[in-house]
Amino acid sequence: MKKIAVLFLLLGTVLSCNEGSKGNQRLIPKSSGNLYNVNVVIDNELWKGRVGDVVRDVLTTVVLGLPQPEPMFDINQMPPQVFSGFAAQNRIVLKIEKSEEAGFEIATDAFARPQKLIIVKGQDNNQIIELVEANKDKILETFKNQEIEARQSLTSKSPHVNNNIEKVLGVKLKFPSVYRIAKEDSTFFWVRKNLTTGTNNFMVYQIPLNAIDKEGDIIQQVIRIRDSIGEKYVPGPLDGSYMKTEEAYTPFMINTIVDNKPTYEVRGTWDIKGTFNAGPFLNFMVEDKMNNRYIVLEGFTFAPSVGKRNYVLELESIIKSLSVNK
């Protein structure tokens, strides 16, 4: 009987420990909020003054390459007193506060999952402003990457099932099922989705590694290649017309990384002469040394009379899902 009593006592101890450990586990709710919408947690008086002006200037930095200025993020300001519960579950949050110790912190999944929370602390207004301005690029990159991941997560719920891109080019791309293959041949794919006022498009193809002279003008070479592709695959409604780089706006380029590979990223605007067709494009040339080629991924949007930021960022999320088969 004593042995049985001891066994029950031990069993009860184990169960109570397990229940205690479960009770100590922190349940993190799912994050929410519209894409590219930042919750800025800041005292109302700071928001109305110079600190608020600087924060707004940073978060509303224009998206490069669009025909008309559009901000990178929309902003929802709230005082610290209401930053709790559902209000704390936005995917991207910037918290500004006065503190005896200055600091810049990036927290992951602090109040929801997935979430990026950036905290800027300063002893006074000037110190806060200095920290925000000094970390502008880090703030924008952190929040943008979080929203690209959120966009890719939405895509994974209803992905397009097409094996031809992988079979022909040996690459994987994740894009929504609402897109359709508009044109394809042995080396080229044009994929598009209908919008209320136009279309969102991306193209995938490859060119030899020696097609780009790294010592030459990269932007001009990218323009020459994309215009030749436009002439061959994207004709306009008029005889002899086709999609080409708009000459009135000089494209810009940055060096970036896609699928852990060096990449030329060129953005600008396109048009079709003799028509009102025009819009932004983003062209990524991914260096695939293993296969002696560049994988070219280009997104372009035709959406007259409406904002194009979200469409372009959706295309960027598709392009950055690239995975090259080994």
Image (cartoon, helix red, strand yellow):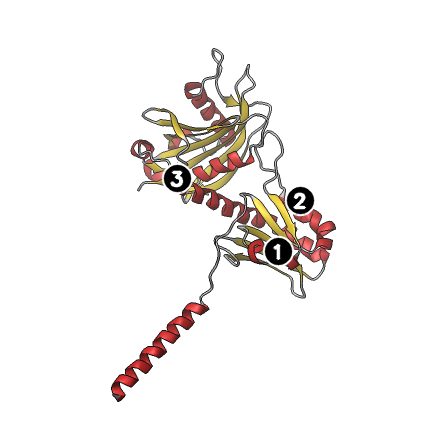
Which residue was labeled with disc 2?
57
Residue 237, how many percent across, how many down? 48, 14
- Name the residue type under label 3: Ser
Which badge, 2 or 3, comes first in the chain's sequence?
2
- CB-based contact (under 8 Å), mark 2 and mark 3: no
- Where residue 276 sits: x, y (%)? 56, 19
In what element is the residue under mark 1? strand
The kind of residue on which mark 2 rests is Asp
Q: Work out how far the residue at label 3 is from the one at label 1, CA to CA, in angstroms.
A: 34 Å
Quadrant assignment, res 44: bottom right
Mark identifier at residue 158? 3
Look at the picture and state if 241 lies above or below 24.
above
Report, in whole angstroms, how far the alpha carbon at label 2 lies from the one at label 3.
Answer: 36 Å
Q: Position of residue 123 (x, y in %)?
A: 70, 62
Mark 3 nearby-residue class (10 Å; few <14, some 14–19, many ≥20): few
Position of 298 compared to 92: left or right? left
Residue lying at 43% horizontally and 23% vertically, measured from the top left? 229
Q: Is residue 196 left or right of residue 21?
A: right
Q: Which residue matches tag 1?
A: 95
Spot occupied by residue 121 in the image (x, y as percentages of width and height): 64, 59
How far is mark 1 from mark 2, CA to CA? 16 Å
Question: Nearer the observer, disc 2 or disc 3?
Answer: 3
Which residue in the rendered view is the most extreme toward the bottom?
Answer: 2
Please tell me whether mark 2 sits on a helix, a strand or a loop. Answer: helix
For label 2, the crowd category at 10 Å Cα-Cα, with few meaning under 14, some 14 to 19 and many 20 or more, is some
Q: How many marks?
A: 3
Q: Is residue 116 above or below residue 211?
A: below
Residue at horizontal 27 percent and vertical 88 percent from the top: 2
Tag 3–tag 1 contact (CB < 8 Å)? no
Secondary element type, mark 3: loop
Q: Nearer the viewer, residue 184 or 29?
A: 29
- Which marked residue is nearer to the observer: mark 3 or mark 1? 3
